[in-house]
Amino acid sequence: MGRCRRPVRRRTRRLDPHPPHPNRKHPLMFYEIRRYQVQPGRRDEWVRYMAEAIIPFQVSKGVSVTATFITDDDPDGYVWIRRFDDEAQRIALNAAVYDSERWTSQLGLQCEQFLIPEQATLTRVIPVSDAGLAGIEKAMGLG
């Protein structure tokens, strides 16, 4: 206990039927899209807690947090995206975060107060472009 229940893992299929280009810098790079259902009426508190505690802690352990969102169609929905170079990095960084003393004695316990764990989902996605999200934003003039 002491750790937020890990979300249900849902794998998504690669939209591109062709294998990655052989010169691709990170052929195994992927993103995790984590969707949480926050206890009714507590989303604003959760957003602050993520921004002030969870995200800085995860980043301090080496996790790349790409983006966070609130859902437009659900007043208690929250989504965030993490990026990993490969599965080995994901395993190592998850261990650094979720097996740490701070997580097990403080942060994880607080998560349990905010979230509805059985409604959390995790989807792993692989970019179909070598550029990933940053390249797409740049191409659209956003980055």
Image (tube, helix red, strand yellow):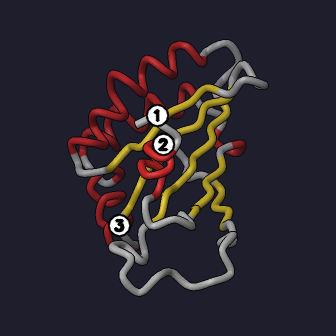
Question: Residue 113 appears in which quarter of the rendering?
Answer: top right
Relative image position of residue 18 (x, y in whole percent): 62, 83
Relative image position of residue 7 (x, y in whole percent): 60, 52
The answer for how far apart the CA atoms under marks 1 and 3 are is 23 Å
Q: Nearer the viewer, residue 78 or 113?
A: 78
Lower sequence index among marks 1 and 2: 2
The quarter of the rendered structure image containing the C terminus is top left
Relative image position of residue 97 (x, y in whole percent): 31, 50
Secondary structure at badge 1 equals loop
Which numbered dot is residue 85? 3
Which numbered dot is residue 137? 2
Q: Nearer the viewer, residue 51 or 18?
A: 18
Lower sequence index among marks 1 and 3: 3
Residue occupying the point 35% across, 34% down: 55
| Any part of residue 30 in sight | yes
Q: Nearer the viewer, residue 94 or 79?
A: 79
The residue tagged 1 is 142
Callout in the foreground (1, 3)? 1
Disc 1 residue crowd, few under 14, some 14–19, many 20+, Cα 10 Å? few
List the single residue furthest toward the left.
60
Residue occupying the point 55% across, 13% down: 44
Position above or below: 47 against 61: above
- Amino acid type at circle 2 is Glu
Disc 3 residue crowd, few under 14, some 14–19, many 20+, Cα 10 Å? some
> Would residue 57 be found to the left or right of residue 94 on screen?
left
Secondary structure at badge 3 equals loop
Position above or below: 22 against 77: below
